[in-house]
Structure formats: structure tokens, C-alpha cells
Image (cartoon, grey):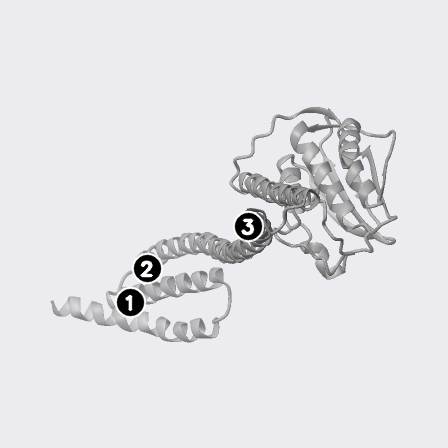
Amino acid sequence: MRNLATVGAVALIGALAVVLPGALVLRLLRGRSVTVHVCALLTLTVLAVLGAVSGVARAMFLSSHDLRVLLLVVAVAGVVSLLAGWWLGQRMAADAMWADEARARERQIEASRRDLVAWVSHDLRTPLAGLRAMAEALEDGVVSDRATVADYHHRMRLEADRMAGLVDDLFELSRINAGALRLSLDSVFLGDVVSDAVASAGPVAGARRVRLVAAEDGWPVVRASGPELARIVANLLGNAIRYTPADGTVTVTGGQDEQGGWFAVTDTCGGIPDGDLPRVFDVAFRGEAARTPQVRDDHSGASGGLGLAIVRGLVEAHRGAVAVSNTAGGCRFSVRLPVG
């Protein structure tokens, strides 16, 4: 027992001779990366074992050969431990960064969800209040002449259409965010889709005195789902018409280059402030202060704040890309899609 106690005391002294200054080194390494801390801790552990073994070996009067063998075994084990510590530190650092990014993204999503709920509540409250007021007026007989009653019915239908469009956009956006969107990809001639969208948006543009211009040729064949591609074009056209002032022009062009097929919708809205450009495709971002405001008397197009978010989701589902930039007197929304 006395010999074991002596060995234990010698091993403790040898280990403490390394651990005490090593603790000071670890303190000085505060603020460094996780990998550095893990490697330093493992190095300190290996050196502590080496110090304890060396002290005990000398006290036991081991031969030089046996001591070299023992030290070689400890050194090899130490090198392996350091390599494993470096790898583990890298993994821990990557996991920590991923966790921070996940938490930041979760906070951002939660903030966007709160903004969306507040925005939808506001957009539903306004038409519902109008519908209730007109319905009560009709029910109480406040209005009775045929022209006013017809006008009330017309406005009630417009508000109902507006709310239906909002619900449709919310459903589409929820499918995109939940990953439930399934595309039936096929070769689609982009010119036909644009032609149909321009024809559908023509009456709205005419009512606003906005001129629609589409290129006659140069349209590529892209790999896309027809209905979703039509909605992308329609949303961009509706957005451009909504913010283009009277006597303005909305131009649709397209083509193909080494990066794939593309089309662009250019308007004369007056431009978007540079600080708002990164947020244009965010859910519930409208930016009326950024672009020329228009009175939405026809409730046409995708709901403001959701239309461009849907465009981005649908384009990314096609493995494409959408971008916005300012031009002389307006802005340009460009979409890139794989060729078919």
C-alpha cells in the first residue's frame, strides 16, 4: 500500500506540474474558436498523462529502453487524440454555427408570421367592414333606389372577390412554404404564356390607362409547369400595372442565353429605394412609399404583399431565379428558368 501511495503521489505531482500552467493557458485562450479549445484541452490532458507517467517511470527506475517505449505509446495515443479532437472541434463549431443560424431563421420566420397575421387581419377587416355596412344598409332599407342598390351589389362582389383572391394567395403560399407544391414539368413555349397573360391583363391596364407592350419574337422554350408559370407572369404583370401611373408603360421581353431562358417585366413606376430592393419579395411587404401609389378600385392582380412572395416561391420551385433592379424611371423584374 505504501508503494501504491508513493506512486499515486508522484503521478499527482507530475500531472499538476502540467495542469496548473495549462489552466493559465486555457484562460488566455478565452474567446478563441471551439476547435482551439478542444485541441488545447486534449493537449493538456496528454501532457498531464505524460508528466505523471514520466515521474512514476523515473521513480520505478525503469530502463531507458522501457521508458522510451512507454513514452512512444503515450505520444502516439496523444497524436491520435489531438487529431480526433481537431475533427470533433470542427464538427462542434459547425453544429454551433448551424444552431445559431437555425435560431436566427426561426426568429425571423416567427416575426414574419406575426407580420403576416397582422397584415392579413388588417386586409380582411377592411372589406368585411365595408360588406357589413352595405349589407346592413340594404337590410334596413337605407338605400332603395335601383341604381344605388346595384352599386352596392357591385361593390360587395368586388370585396368578396378581393377576399377570395387573398385566401387563394394564402393557400398557394402555404403550399410553397410547406413543400407541398408538386410541379408537372414540361416543355412550355414562354411566348404563348406571356401572350395569354397580356391578353388577360389588358382590360385592367386599359382601365388604368397603362400601355402593355410584349415582344413579338425571341421567346424561349422553358422547362416549367404551365399553370404555375402562368401565375408567375400574371402576378408580375399585375404588380407592374398596379404601381405604374396613368399613361405609363409596362414592357415584357424575353430570350435565351448561356444561363437558360429568361423573361423580364419592366414598368415605369418611378423606381424602388435601394434599401427596399432586398425586401421586395418578402411576405407582406408592399412598399407603397417606395413606388407610385395607386387606388385599387378594381382589386385586380395578386394581393399586395403576397403576389411577389408567391412569384419567388414558384420560381425557386422551378429551380430558377427571380431578381429586381431599378431602371431609368422604373424597375425591372427578371425571371430565369431552365430551358426545355
Question: Which element carries disc 3, helix, strand or loop?
Answer: loop
Residue designated by label 1: 58
Q: Which numbered circle lies on residue 194?
A: none
Residue drawn at x 72%, y 50% is 296
Q: Position of residue 334 (x, y in %)?
A: 76, 43
Q: Quadrant of residue 158?
A: top right
How many angstroms separate mark 1 from mark 2 (CA)? 8 Å
Residues at discs 1 and 2 in contact (Cβ within 8 Å):
yes
Residue designated by label 2: 67
Mark 2 residue type: Leu
Q: Position of residue 79 (x, y in %)?
A: 43, 55
Mark 1 residue type: Arg
How many angstroms separate mark 2 from mark 3 (CA)? 106 Å
Q: Nearer the viewer, mark 1 or mark 3?
A: 3
For marks 1 and 3 on the same chain, the one whose residue lies earlier in the sequence: 1
Q: Is residue 107 above or below residue 2?
A: above
For marks 1 and 2 on the same chain, the one whose residue lies earlier in the sequence: 1
Q: Residues within 10 Å of mark 3 (few under 14, many from 20)?
A: few
How many angstroms separate mark 1 from mark 3 (CA)? 107 Å
Q: Position of residue 120 (x, y in %)?
A: 56, 52
Using the image as rendered, state which of residue 202 and residue 28 is in the foreground. 202
161 to the left or right of 98: right
Using the image as rendered, state which of residue 94 and residue 189 is in the foreground. 189
Question: Which element carries disc 1, helix, strand or loop?
Answer: helix
Question: Which element carries disc 2, helix, strand or loop?
Answer: helix
Quadrant where the image shows the N terminus: bottom left
Residue at the top extreme, as displayed: 187
Q: Which numbered circle lies on residue 140?
A: 3
